[in-house]
Amino acid sequence: MLLVLILAIEILVSFLLQSTVFVGLSVANAVPDLLLIVTVAAGYHNSRLTGMGTGFFCGLLLDIASGGVLGIYALFYMLIGYACGKFNKYYVQRDWFVPLSLIAVSEFILCTCIYIFFYLIRGDLRFVKYVKSIFVPKMLYTVVIAIVYYLILTFLYERIINRNAEDEAFLAPESIVPEEK
């Protein structure tokens, strides 16, 4: 239950930061995708199901805020959360390479899907221009911000959620093991 509460707070705070503060701090008209960072972190730290649920609600918030087709971002983020949850078995506590790589690759895949579903279908064939002007700045800005933001999320997962799980295991009757004689 604590995990759901923490994830809900992370999603809301990330959405508010992404849509207000970082819009004013945009670099090359790129805003870092904090909701993608939350989705990748949830999947990578916990499981595929947690990544999918987090991705769905992150995408649903973006769908509602954008006013476009309802469910397209939810689908993209949900698939990204599922894919990042597959890497949970490779989770190492102090490793930064895998999560930052997952964030960069996920951002590239997300930008490609957005290009295909929002621009290519309309007949816009300027893929190289789109890569130069949107893909690269957004991906770089997201990865740079992810270094600090992922550290905060890791702190939340390791200190608060894992400590609560240890406390519950200590207080649960199942955790009491009879001594052998």
Image (tube, grey):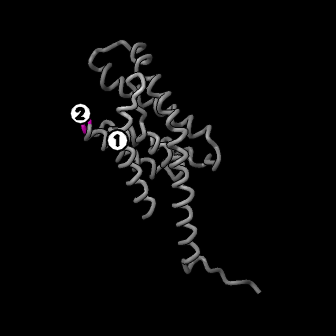
Q: Residue at x 25, y 41 (%)?
A: 64
Residue 67 highlighted magenta (yes or no): yes
Element at label 1: helix
In the picture shown, does residue 120 fall above or below 10? Answer: above
User: Which residue is farthest right?
Assistant: 181
Q: Main secondary structure of the magenta part?
A: loop
Residue 81, how many percent across, how many down? 45, 43
If the image is split into quadrants, where does the C terminus sit?
bottom right
Q: Earlier in the sequence, mark 2 or mark 1?
A: 1
Check if residue 80 falls in the magenta segment.
no
Q: Which mark is residue 45?
A: none
Residue 38 percent coordinates (x, y): 45, 45
**Farthest residue in the left direction?**
67
Position of residue 145 in the picture relative to residue 54 (left or right): right
Residue bearing mark 2: 68
Q: Position of residue 119 (x, y in %)?
A: 31, 20
Q: Which mark is residue 59?
A: 1
Q: Amino acid at mark 2?
A: Gly
Q: Which residue is more in the foreground, 10 or 51?
A: 10
Is residue 33 or residue 131 the one in the foreground?
33
Per the rendered image, the range of residues in magenta is 66-70
